[in-house]
Image (tube, helix red, strand yellow):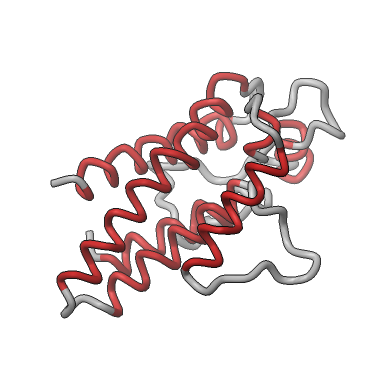
Amino acid sequence: MTPLERSAVYGGFASAFRKADGGTDVLDDTLVPPPPEGASKAFMAAFDPSVSKTAVSLHASAHTERDQTDLYQELIRWYDHFGLKRRDGGELPDHVSVMLEFLQFLTAQEAANAGDAAAVGSLHKAQGDFIERQVLPLVEAMSGKLETDAERYQVLPQGLRAFLEEELTALTQ
């Protein structure tokens, strides 16, 4: 898969974790099933703890014993290092969609710097570190706690986890 194709997949997953029918234009139905009837309600019940007691938060801070401020500061340092800033009213830095958008950006940068082996190597290291330290632990926590009957939202974290594991394998070779 090319860096731009990988970037698009990250964007598709980010969109899928942001809204009920997100990512359908990018993610293959064999990877993530289409949205169910009543998708918005099912999405909220699966991922919004203010709506359902069994919902799984999409925020890393909800799945760690770590101090929330420390986590936010670490994530903001990652984003700042690559020149990215949070827009007013945007999601918090620990939301899975923000993390995936960051990986989308890094893979787009990889494509833009394809002729510079040192830059690509540095971007691969950043992607691997970010996946291992930030995104994969969140996805594993979400997968372990998710209770929903909606197939799309059951499969979504599993599909992302499989993609991230493939990414890690490719980045470390």
**Residue 69 drawn at (x, y percent):** 72, 44
- Which of the 4 quarters of the picture holds residue 40? top right
Name the foreground residue: 30 vs 136: 136
Viewer-side residue, 134 vs 159? 134
Indicate the quadrant where residue 47 lies: top right
Q: Nearer the viewer, residue 87 or 79?
A: 79
Q: Position of residue 163 (x, y in %)?
A: 35, 43
In-image side of 131 versus 51 (left or right)? left
Give the percent coordinates (x, y) of residue 110. Answer: 29, 70
Residue displayed at 70% across by 41% down:
37
Of residues 5 and 24, the one drawn nearer to the viewer in this rendering: 5
Q: At x 82% / y 22%, what residue is drawn? A: 53
Left or right of 32? Residue 168 is: left
**56 relative to 15, above or below:** above
Q: Is residue 16 left or right of residue 54?
A: left
Residue 97: horizontal and vertical position, in percent?
A: 59, 52
